[in-house]
Amino acid sequence: MSDDDIYIVGAGRTVFGRYDGEDNELAEQAVRSALADCGLSWKDVEFAVGGTNGETKPDNLVARLGLTGLPFVTVKNGCATGGVALMTARNGLLAERTDIACVVGYDNHARGAFNASPARYGIGDWYGATGMMVTTSYFALKIQRYLHEHGLGERTLGYAAEKAFEYAAAHPYAWRRKPVTVDEAMDADMINEPLTRFMFCSPDAGAVSLVLARGARAFDLCERPVRLASVALRGRRPGSFEVFSPWLSPGERTSPSIDAAAAAFASAGVSPSDVQVAQLQDTEAGAEIIHLAETGLVPHGAQEEAYRNGDLKVDGRLPINTDGGLLANGEPVGASGLRQVHEVVRQLQGRADGMQVPGDPRIGFTHVYGAPGISACTVLVSEGA
Amino acid sequence: MVTHVVDETLFASTDPVTLRGSACADCGAHVFPAMASCPVCAGVDVTAVALPTEGTVWSWTTQHFAPKPPFRTDEFQPFSIGYIDLGPVIVEGWLVGRTTWQIGEPVRLVLAKAWTDAGIDVHTFGFESMAGGETP
């Protein structure tokens, strides 16, 4: 343990799903829950970072939590908001040589698919008017090509959905907790070939907060602090396949997920084969399949067999998305990346809210990915006890 | 006769129909629609070019629900979209004529009616099968 080691000492989240109250209420619930988890109060927090994709101002949460005068940074990086918030908090603690930071991510989205504006992405109005500014078709086009290139069957998508809802059925904070069989997932209403209704997550509401501590202080606050061994953020390079792209480069495919995962593993001195529990961006079932390979956890083309063998279930070789992932939790964009870290932290501390991965896992990994082609990954290592 | 299109800057010509992209003098990358700089190599020496009009289906899907506005249509019917490999660049566009496709099948560029505006047909670009309208 060094003074430069950053630990997660407190974790709190709300139940995800529909929420009628104000966004800030949700965020406050998560912060108070995370602080209670490590026995701290808002007055102890020296640096805060908040993220949301909505209209509220995270830095004004101080109106509810207390006007302590602390620096509070707001981040807004789409689906990668949680990862960026965590990285910003770590960097803040290291740069300022302070001890306690609080991170919060939250959102409360309207029903239905996101409705993005072409102008916000620098694309002409024609793109939206002709029906191409649609996230679901992007995901479908991407996994359709991926399955073809790697010789994977469409049933792989059904396995991914079944696994998600099996985990979620046992998780008290998940939104959709009804089990779905592989056949039910395959036979459900087609949204965009090859993806059916059960293979997409939906925008919803939720909040997650984490408390970070630097150096020895972590061990005063928490019996089993989880070390943030690395966090890496990367953007897209030529050859990546991103949402709202009127054109793609031919030739070799790249991905910000490949780059962020490789950077996170290298910085932590950990190999993908060391990982014992992981969370991957599964905006839809195909994304999990692609990200298993892009992060290095399962080779390209081997995913169907990994699902079929049960490798990714709780008693398998590499349990993935053990809280049901986005498929079962939905996607409150600002909270989603922190939900992943929350779940892995609880797994590494041996106190999972849902199914606990057996065998005292010590090394975890998280991956978020989203528009306009950014990814953030973390490596988490359990210490103590 | 004037052909009305969703955005004139997408086209090098509407008769015969060709798409207007841009090519980078430094790295050769082609993009669509045309841009004033090159996102691949960050170069600024780019010129507008007419893109090839024939290619193959690189990926496809069918839109089974009506997108929210600003999507515009006279009457929603499920429609296919795809990425078409034109050689120097892969372009996203409508796949017209049917709703089931195969990766690798040859297609050619066409004008397709997008909606009617005060009695005038407004067109966008699409790609049709070179083998005919039947599902393979």
Image: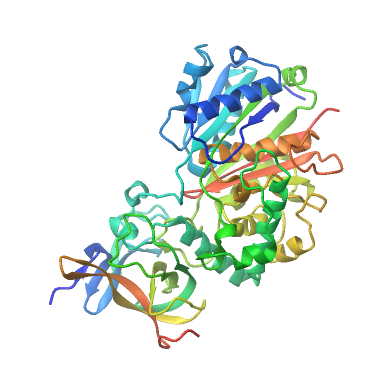
Q: Nearer the viewer, residue B28 or A384?
A: A384
Residue at 52% from the left image edge and 63% from the top image edge: A140
In the rendered image, which quarter contains the C terminus of chain A? top right
Depth check: B135 or A296 in front?
B135
| In the displayed structure image, the side of residue A82 where residue A359 appears, left or right | right
Q: Can residue A196 be seen from the camera position used here? A: yes
In the picture, which quadrant includes the N terminus of chain A?
top right
The residue located at (79%, 49%) in the rendering is: A314
* On screen, residue B127 above or below A122: below
Residue A326: x and y in percent read: 60, 48
Q: Is residue A103 left or right of residue B95?
A: right
Q: On the rendered structure, is B119 left or right of A64?
A: left
Q: Is residue A50 above or below residue A18?
A: above
Quarter location, residue A254: bottom right
Quarter of image, res B118: bottom left
Q: Is residue B51 visible?
A: no
Residue beneath the point at 47% across and 62% down: A137
Image coordinates for residue A48, horizontal then vertical, percent: 55, 23
The image shows residue A161 at horizontal and vertical percentages of 65, 57
